[in-house]
Amino acid sequence: MDALRRLPDATVLTDPEAMEPFRHDESHVVGCAPLAVVRPRGPAALRELVRLARSEGFGLVPRGAGTGKAGGCVPTARTVVVDLAAWPGSIRVSPQDLSLTAPASALLRDVKATAAESGFFYPPDPNSWESCALGGTLATNAGGPNACKYGMTRHWVLGLEALLADGEIHRFGISSVKANTGPSLAQLLVGSEGIFGLILGATLRLTPQPREYATLLLPVKRWMDLLDLPGRLSAAGFLPSAFEFFDPAVLADLRAHGPEAARRLPGEALAILEFDERGCTSDDFLGALADLLGPVADGLEIAADARQREGIWAVRRVTSAFLKERYPKKVSEDIVVPRSRLREFFERLERTGIPSVSYGHLGDGNLHVNLLAAGETPHEALEAQLGTLFRLAVELGGTLSGEHGIGLAKREAFLALAAPGHIETLRALKRALDPDGIFNPGKVI
Ligand code: 2HG
Ligand code: ZN
């Protein structure tokens, strides 16, 4: 503890009260009390921290803005939280390279805004995009509505800066989409949830800022009809930049108890569809779209201007917090079902009798299924329900987390359900890269 307090170029907290917030993220997981919270400001602090962690046998738990959904940044026993909020660096755009460089401490909001100021777009848009830190989005490979067209954070990472177990900061990758020198170490670290090293910054790929949006409210007469649409749109050559949905229960709840803007939402179930390609507001485009959606749609509302578009997205963005307030004890999941099996998934979920409501990212099959009885259900029963839900997703060719990650929240389920050899391979990598197990111990595997 004395050595920690004397760390060069860092702020160190050891007061239990000051450290209390660091035991939480935005999941239900509550972490252990950390030994200390360290805010490094330079490489000397990190070098010394790694040396101490290895010689004294404590772990380093990376933390961005604490907006994670899987307990990935909450402390396990005998760990120090490495809060990267003060990690130095600025956000810089290179228009010639179509890239942006930023430190892990940058807020995603500022990364997106800086790109936009130069006419570029950085697509990853997790629901916490206004408050989350870039480093966290890299470590968790964050997704969001735009993933159905643009992919996840992973697809936008060209290069990465990371602290590894030798105590040094390494740079992997270059500022170009072409770099083909064997396995990508930058990509190995993206989504690693900090178990191989600590991500300090990145070089990100950019794309031109879309100039046109067609944002539609698509109410349907029969909820199940919504489930075939992602596949039918792809088959017809449409590529929405977002395709979100509310099932009948979530929609009814939003309408009855949600924010003012939700009171007039139409339909038995509802989708938000957005297109951002050039020409997407033309009569031709919208006409072809209406022809395809017409048979199942119960009307179709197109946002007339930016304000209406914003109004639609505002309702979507508060949905997670709204449901949390309405059902404080619910357990929210993040499964993926291939788009071709969505209807089958919901039919089979209904037959399980597990009380749940769903919303989320229908366009890429990433469903936030919320188990409602969780509060009244004894622990084992809840585990059984989760097991049924995850197994169903896996059986249909999906997986147990689309965008929130494993962290501590889903570790046991991941260990039980991963494909043969998957966990062993991850453990072999972990042993090779982090022989003393100092990086985010206990997470993922
Ligand atoms: C969203 O899509 C977020 O709104 C949060 O991923 C989902 O709270 C949740 O489970
Ligand atoms: Zn989501």
Image (cartoon, grey):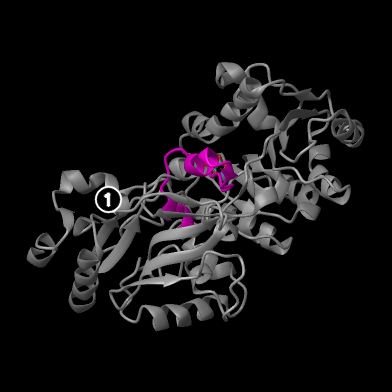
Q: Quadrant of residue 435?
A: bottom left
Front-most of residues 287 and 225? 287
State the image coordinates of residue 442 (x, y, percent, origin top left).
37, 67
Q: Quadrant of the N terminus?
A: bottom left
**Quarter of the image with the C terminus in it:** bottom left
Residue 183, image x, y percentages: 56, 78
Q: Any magenta on residue 25? A: no
Figure quadrant, ligand 1: top right
Residue 337, given in percent of the width and then of the height, sits at 70, 55
199 and 427: which is toward the camera = 199
- Relative to the observer, which residue lies in front, 276 or 76? 276
Amino acid type, residue under disc 1 in the picture: Ala
| Residue 427 in the image: above or below residue 63 | below
Q: Which residues are magenta?
A: 112-138
Can you name the residue that lies furthest to the left here?
A: 2
| Residue to which mark 1 is pinned | 86
121 in magenta: yes
At 69% from the left and 58% from the top, the residue drawn is 392
Q: Secondary structure at mark 1?
A: helix
Q: Position of residue 425 (x, y in %)?
A: 53, 80
Report whether the residue tagged 1 is closer than 8 Å to ligand 1: no
Comparing 218 with 104, the one in front is: 104
Residue drawn at x 66%, y 31% as measured from the top left? 249
Q: Is residue 435 left or right of residue 118?
A: left
Q: How many marks?
A: 1
- 427 in relation to 123, above or below: below
Q: Is residue 253 visible?
A: no
**Dot 1: few (<14), some (14–19), or many (≥20) neighbours within 10 Å?**
some
Could one spot residue 173 in this view of the protein? yes
In the rendered image, the vertical position of residue 240 relative to residue 249, given as above or below: below
Q: Quadrant of the rendered structure where residue 81 is?
A: bottom left
What residue is rendered at 76% in x and 52% in y? 339
